[in-house]
Amino acid sequence: MDAKRGAKVWRGIGMALVFTLAGFAMHGILSATAGEKAQATPEILAEGKALYEKKCAVCHGTDGRGDGSAAYLLYPKPRDFTSGRFKIHSTMTLPTDQDLFNSITNGIAGTSMPSWAALTEQDRWAVVAYIKSLSPVFQAQSPGDPVAIPKAPPRSPGLLALGKKFYKEAGCFDCHGLSGKGDGPSAATLKDEWGYSIVPYDFTVPGRMKRGSTVQDVYRTLQVGIGGTPMPAYGDSLTPEETWALAYYTLSLAKAPLTEPAPSQPGTVVSRFVPGSLPLDPFAVAWSKIPFVRVHLEPLWIRKQPVEEVRVRSVHNGKQIAFLLEWDDSIINQDVLRSQDFRDAVAVQFPVAMAEVHGAGHPEPSFTMGDQHGPVNIWHWKADWEADLQRYRDLQDRYAGMAADLYPFNQTAPPGSSVTAQVKAPTASHDSTFLTGWGAGNLLSTPNRRSSVEDLNALGFGTLTSQPTEDQNVQGRGIWKGGKWRVVMVREMQSQGDRDTQFTPGQSLPVAFAVWDGAQGDRDGQKTVSVWQRLQIEKGR
């Protein structure tokens, strides 16, 4: 490889166009088929604009500037459509209509952009047309023709050896590391054109490349690069044989091939009818008789090893409904007594009701914790609360030798007992009047836990509110075993709370999930989430 070629360092297949579009299949008015261009008629633009405002503006902003109310929670950041600069394209310049359509349809692996194949094809084309209208660049410039992808040669030891040679000589290891883990010497310093840090892709993880993970996808990435990042286009410096060699070699760095396809998006969770009492034990034999559904999760904040799926089972007996949630987590995190510690957690989300304001064909609220016209009900299980059910832990459990001032308000302290004895008495024995969080009814401060699940409501990001103590009616139990969490949540199908989602046999409604990994610093909006799935509740027998 010559010096010119070697100087072009392959940097960061780690960032991607983020179109966080939300919604279920909706009625559209566009009659295009895959491969056709998005026709910008007034009717189509109006339909695309309506969809965009209902489903996309929360991340990308009302005017498409990437400044929606959820943008601060997302990394990579939502794309500023007005700039006309895109990362994913099959040409040497702008994305084609088909490129934009594919990004919406397939999503972007490893980012908060999920697949939106659930939108009708007509609606996806309408959104493409509207996105293009947000920037004048599409009227001023043609994207040109997609780069041609020749027929791939068979993978061979010779091609892999040639690819390994180029991987070193072109400096790919500088960002992606010699073994492809994304830990090269320059990895921590990389930024894109927008000033955001880039996380180089970890080639040892199969099936998660942003543009796609087939050898043809990697070939295309090498040819056109990734717009706005240090990843250059190699189309003018590598021959087709050399490009195929490098594509095969990068794919060979995966520790193991993909053993099964990703879960379908969205999927359907069936709540099976079972007579008798429902199992609260996550390992009860009854659960093994219920098939699970794999639900795909996307990280709102990129990390090396996100939780990529949660496996869901559900049953009901006509009076109560229960969910069993299972996900892989190699480290248990139940202690949050220090500011640097974070809990493992999982949540289930339902719409409180299908608000009419969303209109026919758009009945569900935003999956991003609801919206002003569509409140959601969230059941949030917390690993530390699970441990607190056995014994409430407080600061003295972490800092046994901590100094303390006189605190004479311990209700159970015997007369004449020492200050130390009073301070180290169980928190629940103290007078709640003088512990303000507990006294005010804050469930986070309450030492007398009744459940490991908090029952909440939200109307979008920043509105999460705990239900009153008397309405906390979801029971839960979680067990960590063998590198997996299993959590059961149970509630009456019909409750007295007007903020609760009500369940009826035979009903179908949206459901979504979120998982927090404490070992990776997850908290609040830093989590992995699903889009709306469909919950189908079987009729009783």
Image: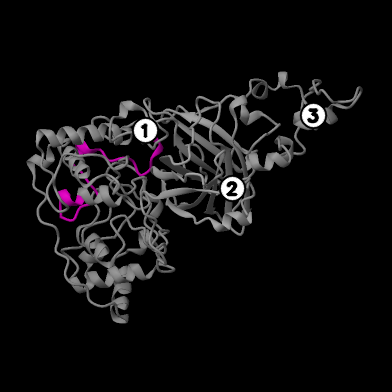
Left or right, residue 85 beside residue 287: left
Work out whether residue 419 or residue 147 is closer to the camera in this orientation and state it. 147
Hey, what amino acid is under mark 1?
A: Pro
Q: Where is residue 280 in the image (x, y as percent from the top left)?
A: 63, 46
Hey, what amino acid is under mark 2?
A: Pro
Inspect the magenta stretch and tell me whether residue 94 lies in it. Answer: yes
The structure's colour scheme is one colour
Q: Residue 365's mark?
A: 1
Looking at the rendered image, the disc whose residue lies closer to the viewer, 3 or 2, is 2
Residue 295 visible at all:
yes
Position of residue 354 relative to residue 31, above or below, is above
Inspect the magenta stretch and tell me whether residue 46 lies in it. Answer: no
Q: Where is residue 161 in the image (x, y as percent from the top left)?
A: 32, 78
Position of residue 117 relative to residue 147, above or below, is above
Q: Name the residue under label 3.
A: 423
Indicate which disc, 3 or 2, sits on the residue closer to the N terminus. Answer: 2
Q: Distance between the residues labelled 1 and 3?
A: 48 Å
Looking at the rendered image, the disc whose residue lies closer to the viewer, 2 or 1, is 2
Total marks placed:
3
Left or right, residue 317 beside residue 47: right
Instruction: Quadrant for residue 162, please give it.
Output: bottom left
Q: Name the residue under label 2.
A: 275
Position of residue 60 relative to residue 306, above or below, is above
Q: Where is residue 45 in the image (x, y as percent from the top left)?
A: 15, 35
Residue at image point 14% right, 60% down: 147
**Residue most extreme to the front:** 541
